[in-house]
Image (tube, helix red, strand yellow):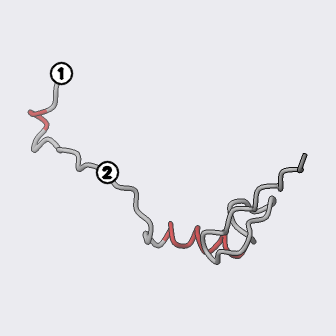
Amino acid sequence: MTTPKPAAAPACPICHKPATERHRPFCSARCADVDLGRWFGETYRVPAEPVDQPESDDDLPG
């Protein structure tokens, strides 16, 4: 019977090196900071449907 090999570490989404346990899913603090900077710089966006805004307070329910 053969022993199964451990699963390979997932790749860092920034530089594609193996991820480390401490900085998961990144390989280092640098790559984690690069990713955070991309979120702050609005490089990444979460898709959403536009919300209809009432034109005046009279259109609000209640």
Q: Are marks 2 and 1 in contact (CB under 8 Å)?
A: no
The kind of residue on which mark 1 rests is: Gly
Q: Is residue 14 above or below residue 52?
A: below
Q: Badge 1: how crowded within 10 Å, few (<14), some, or many (20+)? A: few
* Pointer 2 or 1: first along the chain: 2
- From the viewer's perspective, tell me whether residue 59 is left or right of residue 4: left
- Using the image, tell me which numbered label, if any, was put on residue 48: 2
Q: Which of the two residues, 15 or 45, is positioned nearer the viewer here?
A: 15
- Residue 2 in picture, x, y percent from top left: 89, 50
Q: x, y (%) of residue 46?
A: 40, 56
Q: Compared to 17, does 23 lie above or below?
A: above
Q: Quadrant of residue 7?
A: bottom right
Residue 47 placement (x, y as % from top left) = 34, 55
Residue placed under numbered mark 1 in the picture: 62
Q: Position of residue 30 (x, y in %)?
A: 71, 76
Q: In the figure, 17 relative to 54: above or below?
A: below
- Say what amino acid the circle numbered 2 marks: Ala
Residue at 23% across, 50% down: 50
Q: Residues within 10 Å of mark 2 (few under 14, many from 20)?
A: few
Q: Residue furthest front?
A: 1
- Residue 45: mark: none
**Residue depicted at 69% across the width and 62% down the height:** 10
Instruction: Tell me the SS state at disc 1.
Output: loop
- Residue at 18% x, 21% y is 62
Whole-number angstrom distance, CA of label 2 to CA of label 1: 27 Å
Total labels: the figure holds 2
